[in-house]
Amino acid sequence: MSVTILLIPVALAAASLAGGAGLGAANRARDESRRAGNPSTALTVRTRMKDRGLLGLALDDLGALDVVAGETQVTATIDDIRLSMTLTEDDVWEAHMDRADGIAVDEDIARDILTRLDAAYAGRVQSAVAERIRAQADSAGFELVSETRDEASTVTMVLNVRQDV
């Protein structure tokens, strides 16, 4: 008997949902701030990312500069935009973007950065899950028979149930 596990990268679909909703909330917050007389050149968005280490690796994958990953804050520069991510009380990373020159961060650019970061992060999560499956298959009574990755980065792992368990 075999078990097939598909690790499907859902970054793009999830990013459009999470990023779109997050940016919408950020836009509303910015509009309220402007109406109150507080012009803002920064954009803040809540993300679905949770793992600090994978977040740092995803930033590296994007070619971010000056990546610093601390316990509750991650900072980097992507495409001349300063990104500061802070871990909230409910263990969700909140992204804040601004520019050194004080010019407002364009929402389309921010959405693009977060979409690319989310996709890189999802790829890192997928790799970590695949590695965990590889590492634990034998002790769980499975034998990894094959592993393939298609053009959409979907990983297919076929595991046989070992008869000697």
Image (spheres, rainbow, N blue to C red):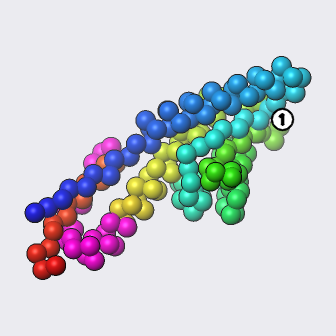
Question: Along the horizontal axis of the image, is 136 left or right of 34?
Answer: left
Q: Residue furthest bottom?
A: 164
Q: Residue furthest front?
A: 90
Quadrant of the snapshot with the N terminus: bottom left
Mark 1: amino acid:
Gly
Q: Secondary structure at mark 1?
A: loop
Question: Along the horizontal axis of the image, is 77 left or right of 2?
Answer: right
Looking at the image, residue 106 lies above or below residue 4 = above
Quadrant of the snapshot with the C terminus: bottom left
Q: Which residue is mark 1?
A: 102
Q: What residue appears at the point 82 percent right and 23 percent down from the top-left corner?
A: 34
Q: Residue furthest right?
A: 37
Location of residue 118 in the rendering, given as x and y in whole percent from the top left corner: 52, 45
Q: Quadrant location of residue 103? A: top right
Q: Which residue occupies the foreground of this view, 120 or 2?
A: 2
| Visible residue check, residue 83 | yes
Q: How many marks?
A: 1
Q: What residue appears at the point 32 percent right and 72 percent down from the top-left corner?
A: 136
Q: Residue furthest top?
A: 35
Question: Along the horizontal axis of the image, is 151 left or right of 75?
Answer: left
Looking at the image, residue 108 lies above or below residue 141 = above
* Magenta segment: 132-152
Q: Which residue occupies the foreground of this view, 142 or 125?
A: 142
Location of residue 46 in the rendering, given as x and y in whole percent from the top left corner: 63, 41
Within the magenta stretch, is there residue 8? Answer: no
Q: What residue appears at the point 37 percent right and 66 percent down from the top-left corner?
A: 131
